[in-house]
Image: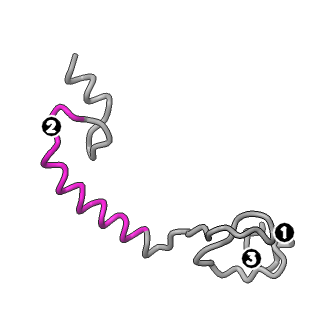
Amino acid sequence: MLIAGAPEDPALPGASGAPQAYSQAGRPGETRPPLWIPTLEDKVLQRAVAMLLEGIYEQDFSDDSYGFRVGRSAHQALNRKL
């Protein structure tokens, strides 16, 4: 089984298999901004910020609000209203 980006992958000649911080998309010679692929550190930081903000904003929400809240679902909203 071949893993994309592995040195023996014939579809990606010259690939080292090492993760890249960013990649370019588009045709050769076309100038485009890089696509930033989040690293593990980025994902950990994003989750930490999300947890911090959830704790702050959760206090401001109404008890009748169920959309996109941690531990709440549309099924719970329907059960409460019925």
Q: Which residue lies furthest to the top in this view?
A: 82
Instruction: For mark 1, give the secondary structure.
Output: loop
Residue at the image position 20 percent from the left and 24 percent from the top: 80
Quadrant hosting residue 11: bottom right
Q: Is residue 54 magenta?
A: yes
Circle 3 Cα neighbour tier, 10 Å, few/some/many (<14 / 14–19 / ≥20): some
On residue 11, which mark appears? 1
Q: Please name the amino acid that badge 1 sits on.
A: Ala
- Given residues 46 and 25, the one toward you in this image is 25
Residue 44 falls left or right of residue 35: left
Quadrant hosting residue 25: bottom right
On residue 62, which mark appears? 2
Residue at the image position 35 percent from the left and 64 percent from the top: 47
N-term-proximal mark, 1 vs 3: 3
Determine whether 72 is above or below 40 in the image.
above
Residue at the image position 24 percent from the left and 23 percent from the top: 79
N-term-proximal mark, 2 vs 3: 3
Q: Please name the amino acid that badge 2 sits on.
A: Ser
